[in-house]
Image (cartoon, rainbow, N blue to C red):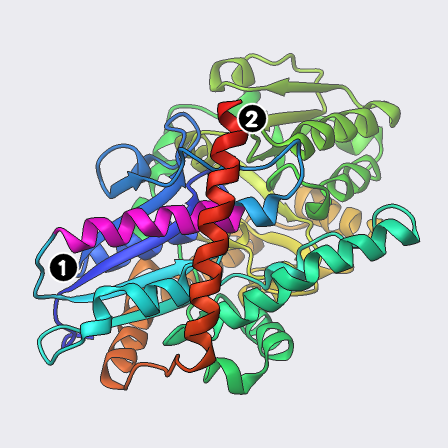
């Protein structure tokens, strides 16, 4: 909105890796910074060798705080507790830094993934002394309720009961903390429906949708790469991009590809690329499981961690695993692929299909969740049952051997136009500024009474936990 004055935007995000949530929060920062707002991202972790370029090259002001006392986990457990404590430690640093600066702009906090800091920002932030010349508001960007992401079906009945008891206070705390936000937005209509059902419409107010975006300005990067030569001698590439997590179900892509048969697989290659972190046990295990699956089907596999090694794999390789692909090579892959395979079921939004459409590549995705809002059946891609491998194989065969270049060109143009109109950085910036304007125009959402007592008790608990964590680390 042209009428929104310059604001001081403070973004709080737990870990700036290379996942979809990280890409989204980087784009939020870029969209607001491009419109003249002062944007600072605070995070508890950033590995400069494992993050998006804008988070390390100076494009954005990224500050790593709150990472000196609380570990990310304890012996591979207690991730949610450690995430909350790390964010609260981070919040202390944020408030301390804000207290040493004098600004005339409104302070807009944008929080995502973990809402634990919201009540503390609301209670102790500079907005507690709000005046006509300075306002503080808190916007929470909800990707999906954390309590629905927790795995509760592992182990026997007793273990599941213990996990439920362990999770109960965190589930309650998530809803309570989220209700302190002045505005909650969701990344899709699908997510909005789930959020409203889990937390209740009354406690969160009118949850609006702000779609994630892709950078249209960089859409031609892959086209330039094509002029330098086709990858792997011009093999027909079927591409899957996702983090190496079981819920992403990249095994579907392998099984459906195998369904083409040896003759039709000739001259093709399935490339499975995505976020991979050696610190995350599931990434390591799932990559191994996928490799074993492909091998058991008689497919030749290779794994590459660098672009150089990826480009030099033998011609006989059927399935190539690419771990943590750099953005430039990822764009080249997208521009030169015949089809993107997006396998997750009930994905909250799914930015990868939009990135593929930006490059003019058709998308085959599960007919659930966010892809229902991004992909137009038969125009920009196809939506199929992720539990029926044969349906996916049929679409692969259609794209590789049945569609003409004219048909593919028409689909490519439709995909690019849809991204330009609905999922560009400009469109996201418009939506964000509209939500911020509405938030500033209204009163702060009330947060008082017994909540203040709970905050005080929580502060005491956090201090105690931080001391215990420090003591354990010191021994």
Which residue is the site of mark 2?
Answer: 234
Which residue is the site of mark 1?
Answer: 36
Q: Which residue sits at x=23%, y=84%?
A: 441
The percent position of residue 266, horizontal first and vertical second, equals 74, 26
Mark 1 burial class by Cα count in 10 Å: few <14, some 14-19, many 20+ = few
Which callout, 2 or 1, points to the residue nearer the camera? 1
Between the residue at mark 2 and the residue at mark 1, the CA separation in whole angstroms equals 44 Å
Q: Is residue 35 left or right of residue 276?
A: left
Q: Is residue 383 above or below residue 232?
A: below
Mark 2 burial class by Cα count in 10 Å: few <14, some 14-19, many 20+ = few
Residue 68: image quadrant is top left
Query: Which residues are the magenta region?
Result: 83-100
Of the numbered discs 2 and 1, the one sitting upstream in the chain is 1
In front of the other: 168 or 28: 168
Query: Among all residues in the image, which is located at the extreme right?
Result: 157
Residue 84 located within the stretch drawn in magenta: yes
The label number, if any, that marks residue 428 in the structure image? none
Residue 463 located within the stretch drawn in magenta: no
Q: Is residue 72 above or below residue 41?
A: above
Q: Which residue sits at x=25%, y=65%?
A: 108
Magenta part mainly helix, strand or loop?
helix
Q: Which residue sits at x=62%, y=73%?
A: 194
């Amino acid at each position: 909105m042209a009428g929104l004055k310059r604001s001081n935007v403070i973004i709080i995000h737990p870990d700036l890796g290379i996942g979809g949530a990280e890409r989204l929060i980087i784009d939020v920062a870029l969209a607001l910074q491009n419109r003249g707002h002062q944007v600072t991202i605070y995070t508890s972790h950033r590995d400069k060798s494992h993050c998006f370029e804008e988070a390390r090259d100076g494009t954005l002001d990224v500050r790593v705080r709150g990472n000196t006392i609380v570990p990310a986990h304890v012996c591979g457990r207690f991730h949610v507790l450690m995430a909350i404590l790390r964010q609260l430690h981070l919040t202390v640093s944020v408030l301390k830094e804000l207290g040493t600066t004098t600004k005339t702009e409104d302070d807009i906090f944008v929080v995502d993934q973990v809402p634990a800091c919201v009540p503390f920002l609301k209670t102790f932030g500079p907005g507690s002394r709000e005046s006509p010349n300075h306002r503080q508001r808190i916007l929470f960007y909800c990707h999906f309720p954390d309590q629905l992401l927790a795995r509760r079906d592992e182990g026997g009945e007793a273990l599941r009961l213990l996990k439920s008891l362990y999770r109960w206070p965190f589930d309650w705390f998530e809803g309570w903390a989220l209700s302190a936000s002045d505005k909650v937005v969701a990344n899709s209509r699908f997510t909005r429906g789930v959020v409203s059902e889990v937390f209740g419409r009354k406690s969160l107010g009118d949850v609006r949708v702000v779609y994630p975006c892709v950078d249209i300005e960089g859409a031609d990067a892959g086209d330039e790469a094509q002029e330098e030569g086709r990858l792997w001698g011009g093999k027909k590439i079927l591409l899957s991009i996702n983090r190496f997590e079981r819920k992403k179900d990249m095994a579907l892509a392998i099984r459906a590809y195998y369904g083409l048969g040896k003759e039709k697989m000739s001259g093709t290659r399935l490339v499975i690329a995505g976020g991979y972190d050696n610190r995350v046990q599931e990434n390591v295990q799932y990559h191994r499981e996928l490799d074993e699956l492909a091998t058991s089907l008689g497919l030749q596999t290779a794994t590459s961690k660098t672009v150089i090694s990826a480009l030099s794999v033998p011609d006989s390789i059927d399935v190539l695993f690419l771990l943590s692909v750099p953005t430039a090579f990822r764009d080249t892959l997208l521009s030169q692929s015949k089809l993107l395979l997006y396998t997750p079921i009930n994905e909250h939004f799914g930015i990868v299909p939009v990135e593929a459409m930006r490059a003019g590549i058709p998308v085959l995705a599960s007919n659930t969740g966010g892809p229902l809002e991004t992909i137009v059946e038969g125009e920009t891609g196809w939506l199929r049952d992720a539990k029926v491998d044969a349906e996916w194989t049929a679409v692969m065969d259609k794209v590789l051997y049945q569609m003409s270049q004219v048909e593919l060109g028409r689909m490519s143009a439709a995909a690019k136009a849809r991204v330009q109109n609905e999922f560009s950085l400009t469109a996201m910036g418009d939506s964000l500024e509209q939500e911020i304007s509405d938030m500033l125009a209204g009163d702060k959402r009330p947060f008082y009474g017994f909540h203040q007592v709970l905050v005080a008790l929580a502060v005491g608990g956090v201090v105690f936990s931080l001391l215990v964590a420090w003591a354990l680390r010191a021994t």
